[in-house]
Image: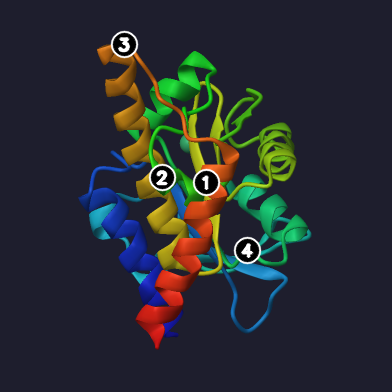
Amino acid sequence: MDELKELVHTAKALYRTGLVRGTSGNVSLRDPESPDRMWITPSAIPYDAITTEDLVQVDLNSGLPVSGRRKPSSETPMHSAIYRLRSDVQAVVHTHSTYATMFACAGEEIPTVHYLIAEIGDRVPVADYAVYGSEELARNAVEALQSAGSNGALLKNHGVITVGDSLASAYARAEIIETVAQLAFGAKLIGRCQMLSPEQLEETRKKFVSYFAASKG
Ligand SMILES: [Zn+2]
């Protein structure tokens, strides 16, 4: 399946661009042939060694592996919970990217200092802390995404989660969150964070829609 190659490609791109390090982070894709299943990256396999053979297919309701020779990522409960509650979501990316995770460690939302954040929503919420890989973390992450109506969230003292209708969009959003976190960190150092209002972000989103429509046409 070409989609599985794209999943591996996305995981390697996260590693190559430094959004994940070591074996941290994970990526999944809703199974295009069975929407109540997902394909997810394996636990503890170095990114440069991952092939499509290492991906694990998981049942979203039981959270159990259906096929694959590897152990699925430890964050399988979080990915499963998101797909169960958001039928629009086709892909999920989880990273510990440095600047965004610094905000997560401070328990602070990323200030809306750059228009690109409109792609995520009006805000990037912070999900309450729970130990990694737990059902509680899965619940907290889903609650944060739902309450903010956003395509991404910070996980307190942990990292970042983004969702999309494709691997490319979930990946782009993980990159945007890290970029805006860097810019916000710098703006804070300079001493003033000039935030964009929800109205300004909405104006940006409308422009994004016409931009993408034009680029497709
Ligand atoms: Zn993590």
Residue 148: x percent and y percent? 68, 40
Please identify the residue farthest to the bottom as the structure is shown: 217
Q: Which residue is mark 4?
A: 89
Asked if disc 1 and disc 3 are in contact, CB closer than 8 Å, the reply is: no
Q: Are marks 3 and 4 in contact (CB under 8 Å)?
A: no
Q: CA distance from mark 1 to mark 2?
A: 6 Å
Residue 76 on image: x %, y %: 60, 50
Sequence order check, earlier mark of 1 and 2: 2
Q: Is residue 131 above or below residue 209?
A: above
For residue 115, the mark is 2
Q: x, y percentage for residue 4?
A: 43, 75
First in sequence, mark 1 or 3: give its number: 3
Question: How many numbered circles are shown?
Answer: 4
- CB of mark 1 near ligand 1 (< 8 Å): no
Element at badge 4? Answer: loop
Left/right placement of residue 210 relative to residue 18 reads right
Seen at 40% across and 57% down, the residue is 171
* Front position in the image: 144 or 139: 144
At label 2, the amino acid type is Tyr
Residue beneath label 1, please? Answer: 201
Q: Which residue is located at x 54 percent, y 35 percent?
A: 197
According to the picture, the residue beneath numbered tag 3 turns out to be 191
